[in-house]
Image (cartoon, rainbow, N blue to C red):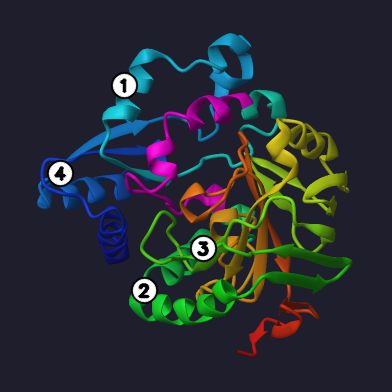
Amino acid sequence: MDPRIQAYARVLVDCVDPQPGWQVSIRSQPPGRPLIEEVARELARRGARALVRLSFDSAGGTFTRVAPMELIENPCDIELHEIANTDSYIAILAPENTRAAADIPAERLGARQAALRKPHMPFLTDQKPWVGCYFPTAAAAQDAGLPLPAFEDFLYGAVLIDWHELRDRMERIAEHFDRAETVRIVGVETDLTFSLAGRQGKVDALAANMPGGEIFYSPVEDSAEGVISYLEYPACYLEHEVGGVRLRFEGGRIVEASATSDEEFLLGALDTDEGARRLGEFGIGCNPGIQRHMRNTLFDEKMEGTIHLAIGTGFPQIGGLNESAIHWDMVKELRNGGRIELDGKVVQENGVWAL
């Protein structure tokens, strides 16, 4: 076995820091077996129980595609009981087909997300620990435009790093944003401002995402003004890939939206609920092991020299008030003439910090 899998398992278990006697759910798909087994072993070494839950997809699959909406909108009692009684969970995405849900309408996918959001609130508000990650599969490698061995090297290079050193560096950057009120993002067909007044950021290192490597905030909900265009990379969400997204904000709300591909899905997602048209997150990519776009948001949002904005629900634990069934991160490249301003001062230009 690749020794990096064992190291990866230790990192994932470190993220949730299980206590003796904990029940930890491992959610994955069959191709993830090598990592699933190593995580289960590591949990056992620390006195925790691993509850392995396998599915054949990551977005609801056949059930979400064909079930009556009443069933999609109401999780069954067994599912709710398990979520409520699990101390932690580790989600290991191991897709055989990363577009398996591409034909499922936004209405159905959104309903499934909404139904699971409330029972998962203890995890989403940091009351219970969890972590999500990928196991390298041929499908994920193909999305990235890489052969599987090269994708494996990339993935392990992004997760097996000095997390304590990166945390220290990100905390120094976060100090400047914590003190600021107004953020301005300027880039290709982009000029967007929003407020962070009264909001504190969170540094992601050995936390809910692996790889980590971002600093993120929930912007003031009615503050976004201007335009942002995601022309460099597609916006990937729930196994849909939407190209050329352009959003215009007024008073914090998206009042115009377009895309060059799969626009119907974008507009459907924006109509999920009232909160879907407001910002839930502003994030800054800082992971030095991620330098190129992989068509995989878990990696792409951490790409050094980029920012990402999520439409939809915010993070109440850091002051976010927006509520929605969706949380869709979209990555904006700033290394090709973009910049970040804080209260009128340039703090990053072409992806290089000037702090």
Q: Which residue is mark 2?
A: 163
Image position of 202 with respect to 162: above or below: above
Tell me where the magenta segment starts and ends, as one range.
111-140
Q: Which residue is mark 3?
A: 151
Image position of 277 with respect to 141: above or below: above
Q: Determine contact: label 2, label 4, CB under 8 Å.
A: no
Callout 2 amino acid? Trp
Name the image quarter holding residue 161. bottom left
Assign a secondary structure to mark 4: loop
- Quote the CA–CA distance across marks 3 and 2: 21 Å
Q: Which mark is residue 81?
A: 1
The residue drawn where x is 56% and y is 66% is 302
**Quadrant where the image shows the C terminus:** bottom right
Q: Is residue 175 left or right of residue 41?
A: right
Q: Determine contact: label 1, label 2, CB under 8 Å.
A: no
Mark toward the viewer: 3 or 1: 1
Residue found at the very far bottom of the displayed protein: 354
- Quote the CA–CA distance across marks 3 and 4: 31 Å
The residue drawn where x is 78% and y is 79% is 336
**Quadrant where the image shows the N terminus:** bottom left
Assign a secondary structure to mark 2: helix
Position of residue 162 measured from the top left corner of the image (x, y, whole percent):
35, 77
Q: Is residue 141 left or right of residue 85?
A: right
Asked whether residue 135 is drawn in magenta, I would say yes
Position of residue 316 measured from the top left corner of the image (x, y, whole percent):
50, 47
Q: Which mark is residue 48?
A: 4
